[in-house]
Image (cartoon, helix red, strand yellow):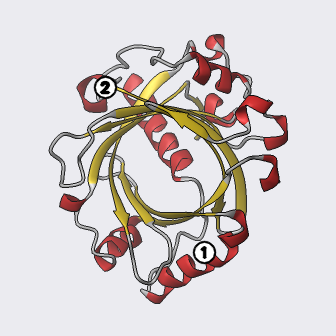
Amino acid sequence: MADTFRNAEAEIKIILAGGTAEDACRSLGLEPGDGKHLSVYFWDAPWADGDGIRLPLAEAGAIVRLRRPDRGGGKGDKGNRSDLTAKLRPCDPAALPAKWRENRGGKGWEFKVEEDWSGSDRVWSASLKVDGNYEPPVAGEGHGPAACWPPPLTPGQRDLLAHAGVTDDGLRDAVALGPVRAVRWKLSRQDLDRPLTAEFWSVDYDGPCFLELSLRAPHADAPGAQELLERTVLERGLRPAPRQASKTQTVMTELARNHLRRAV
């Protein structure tokens, strides 16, 4: 399937949760002041289904995400540009039209197709990221109503989302969820032969937290790279979350739960 796309890579991920995530930060020497601090927002139209939460856009395979740098958060806070991303995850690579089958980019935008590797799971995604000066979509640091919908999606982003069956009509009831507080580090380590990205996410002060470790590799090299990353984590006495669920899905569910609780 990798041959379907030109320049496609695998992104190999390990998720550590709760206290293990905090232990991993200490073990890897991840200092908050050395990372890039971000506020992360998502859009969906959540509703309660008994004790569960439904996220219709995410369930359709459509993610809309805004990342805004927190000014002065740390030494890594350079190039203070926000970015808005429309992503299909999961997506069926064979169903994408030809124009969405090649990684490419230009000034202020990047389109990328890649396969996410998390444990034994393999999930394809396609994303179009556009840089810009975006305002926070939620009033009161997440404790007020959504400022507006829609976010300023480009025609290309809307076209990409349409391949998940998500149109403007489907976006009409969406609300902004967030923020997630994130810190991201770019690392070069001697025990890994590829650059490592570490990203710590937290929801509120007493909510869930996660550390995602990720690296990219050509598909032919991905099994060896995954084995090396897993060994590096285990040798530090760290145990990944037994269920390597997407941190985006887990966090969006928590944000949606908080949103619906405030709306009552």
Q: Place residue 261 in its image quadrant.
A: top left
Residue at the left extreme, as displayed: 72
Residue 152 seen in the figure: yes
75 over 218 or under it: above or below: above
Residue 64 seen in the figure: no
- From the viewer's perspective, is the residue at label 1 or at label 2 nearer? 1
Q: Is residue 209 left or right of residue 157?
A: left
Q: Is residue 228 left or right of residue 262?
A: right
Residue occupying the point 44% across, 87% down? 237
Q: Which residue is mark 2?
A: 136
Residue at the front extreme, as displayed: 106
x and y percentages locating residue 90 in the rendered image: 70, 43
Q: Mark 1 falls on what kind of element? A: helix
- Mark linked to residue 225: 1
Residue occupying the point 66% across, 26% down? 160
Binning the other alpha carbons within 10 Å of mark 2 as few (below 14), some (14 to 19) or many (20 upward) gives many
